[in-house]
Amino acid sequence: MKKKFKLQDLDCANCAAKMENAIKNIPGVQDASVSFMMQKMVIEADDDKFDAVLKQAIAAIEKVEPDCKVLL
């Protein structure tokens, strides 16, 4: 399953790269991208694990940049 999410208050490209790397290391994630310019995130993960992966991805984003929010 592949889903796109808007990000709010993503402040720099370096933070986006850190977020992307952290999300790619979550078990069950097949691919992920975080775009600073587009303020969006795309996650491709196993269907049965997607909700758990999304929770971990949000936690990883908040760890890198606490002000950044994922708009669900």
Image: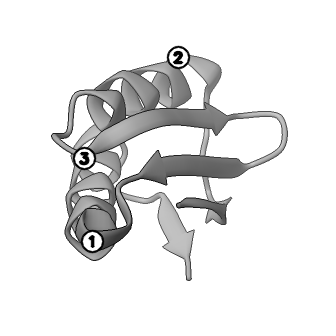
Which kind of residue does numbered mark 3 sit on? Answer: Ala
Mark 2 vs mark 3, CA separation in Å: 14 Å
Identify the residue position indicated by label 1 in the image: 48
In the rendered view, does 29 fall on the left or right side of 7? left
Report x, y in % for residue 36: 71, 34
Identify the residue position indicated by label 3 in the image: 60
Disc 1 residue crowd, few under 14, some 14–19, many 20+, Cα 10 Å: few
Determine whether the residue tagged by mark 1 lies in a helix, strand or loop.
Answer: helix
Counting residues from the start of the chain, the first of labels 2 and 3 encountered is 2
Colour convention: one colour
Instruction: Using the image, tell me which numbered label, if any, was put on residue 14.
Output: 2
In the rendered view, does 60 fall on the left or right side of 47? left
Q: Is residue 28 above or below residue 69?
A: above
Counting residues from the start of the chain, the first of labels 1 and 3 encountered is 1
Determine whether the residue tagged by mark 3 lies in a helix, strand or loop.
Answer: helix
Q: Is residue 16 above or below residue 62?
A: above
Residue at 36% across / 22% down in the picture?
21
